[in-house]
Structures are given as C-alpha cells and as structure tokens.
Image (cartoon, rainbow, N blue to C red):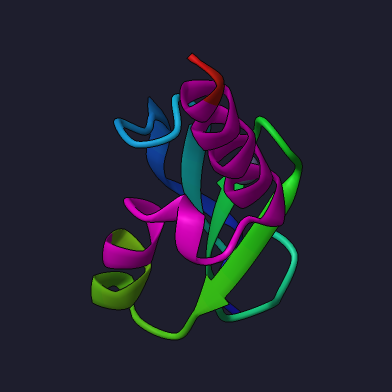
Amino acid sequence: MPRIRLISDVKKNRQTGTHIQVDFGLNEEGYYQATCYGHGEYVNASTLHSIRRIATDPLGWCSGCKLDKALAFEEEDLE
Ligand SMILES: [Zn+2]
C-alpha cells in the first residue's frame, strides 16, 4: 500500500495568492491531491503530471478562490 507523502511544499499561487500543497494519498488513498490552504478545499488526480498542472490553477477547482477572484473584479469595477 502506498503511503501518504508530501509531493510539493505549500506554494503561493500567482493568480490567487492562496497557498497550494500537493500530496499523495492524503484524503483519497492512491490518488494525488492538491489542497488550497486558504479555503480548505482539495482536488484529486490519478497522475503526478495532472496534479501538478491542476495545482497551478486553483480557480479551476476551489470555489473559495473563484469567489475571491469574483469579489476582486467587483472592487475593480467600483473604482
Ligand atoms: Zn482556494
């Protein structure tokens, strides 16, 4: 059985400013996982290649990041 392991340390995402970490087997056994530490949401993928790509785009899977981005746009419109 593969053990839980850290793949990539917490990194600040350029788009959202939130911190994303990549692990293996953290919440879903046998799957890679990217976690948004700003909002506590995560997504799984079966390959390391996929999860690395997904991890750089939290707007694609974290509703908290999407909401923050939407609110930021609204603030820009008000100026
Ligand atoms: Zn997020």
Position of the N terminus, as image quadrant, is bottom right
Q: Farthest residue toward the top? A: 79
Q: Give how far across and how far down residue 53 sits, in percent.
A: 27, 64
Vertical order, 77 against 48 (above or below):
above
Which residue is found at the position 48% from the left and 65% from the top? Answer: 60
Residue placed most toward the observer, 49 or 63 = 63
Which residue is found at the position 44% from the left and 24% from the top? Answer: 17
Q: Give how far across and how far down residue 74 sits, in percent.
A: 58, 33
52 displayed left or right of 21? left
Q: Farthest residue toward the bottom? A: 46
Which residue is found at the position 35% from the left and 81% from the top? Answer: 47
Q: Quadrant of residue 43?
A: bottom right
State whether residue 25 appears in this view. Answer: no
Q: Give how far across and how far down residue 16 sits, in percent.
A: 44, 33
Q: Is residue 63 magenta?
A: yes
77 displayed left or right of 43? left
Type of secondary structure dominating the magenta stretch: helix
